Image (tube, rainbow, N blue to C red):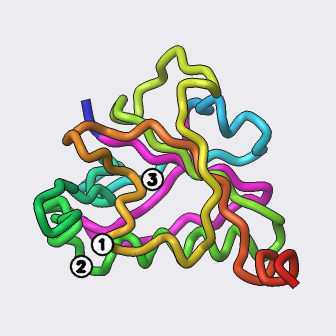
């Protein structure tokens, strides 16, 4: 299949008008288990001519050699008119304005509903600033699609908690 990325939010997000090849989002046709507590769930993917396609433009290939990890963006990421990870970070930042956290989930099912359970996902907490290139958020080192659930909190909330 293909990479699928979903965003869970406590607020409704305004959809974007974007050019073909850009990251875009739409309400999801189903809710992955880790996002069941969010009232708004969106599917994120590459804007095609008519609809939103797969999420592969967010994928980075990762492999290891004697010098450590190496990252190669998917060809769709490089072909996008603007950096899809910057657009994702902007979208998450918007969702965090009036909400304490945002959920981000990825799997390899290409946007198709599957019989998932919350325990099927590797869970992590990340900061907004972790959404960037060479972070391999949606990658595994074995060229497989990751199945992960992220809870994202704003940098301000993290700084206040650390104080």
Foreground residue among 101 and 111: 101
In which quarter of the view is residue 79 placed?
bottom left
**Which marked residue is nearer to the observer: mark 1 or mark 3?**
3
Q: CA distance from mark 2 to mark 3?
A: 16 Å
Judging by the rendered image, the residue that carries numbered circle 1 is 19
In which quarter of the view is residue 9 placed?
bottom right
Q: Is residue 56 above or below residue 128?
A: above
Q: Is residue 112 above or below residue 129?
A: above
Q: Is residue 9 left or right of residue 1?
A: right
The residue at the point 32 percent across, 42 percent down is: 3
Say which label, 2 or 3, has the lower sequence index. 3
Label 3: which secondary element: strand
Say which label, 1 or 2, has the lower sequence index. 1
Assess whether mark 2 and mark 1 are in contact (beta carbons under 8 angstroms): yes
The residue at the point 48 percent across, 70 percent down is: 131
Q: Position of residue 84 (x, y in %)?
A: 35, 70
Judging by the rendered image, the residue that carries numbered circle 3 is 44
For the record, the magenta segment spans 3-29
Q: Is residue 113 above or below residue 92?
A: above
User: Alpha-carbon neighbours of circle 3 within 10 Å: few (<14), some, or many (≥20)?
Assistant: many
Label 1: which secondary element: loop
Judging by the rendered image, the residue that carries numbered circle 2 is 81
């Amino acid at each position: 299949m293909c990479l699928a990325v979903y965003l869970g939010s406590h607020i409704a997000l305004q959809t974007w008008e974007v050019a073909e090849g850009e990251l875009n989002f739409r309400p999801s046709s189903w809710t992955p288990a880790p996002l069941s507590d969010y009232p708004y769930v969106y599917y994120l993917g590459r804007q095609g001519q008519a609809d939103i396609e797969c999420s592969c433009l967010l994928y980075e290939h990762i492999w290891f050699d004697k010098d450590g990890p190496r990252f190669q963006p998917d060809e769709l990421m490089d072909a996008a008119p603007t950096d899809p990870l910057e657009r994702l970070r902007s979208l998450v930042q918007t969702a965090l304005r009036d909400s304490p956290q945002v959920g981000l989930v990825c799997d390899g099912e290409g946007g198709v509903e599957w019989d998932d359970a919350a325990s099927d996902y590797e869970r992590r907490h990340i900061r907004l600033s972790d959404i960037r290139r060479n972070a391999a958020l949606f990658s595994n080192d074995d060229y497989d699609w990751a199945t992960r659930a992220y809870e994202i909190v704003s940098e301000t909330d993290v700084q206040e908690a650390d104080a």
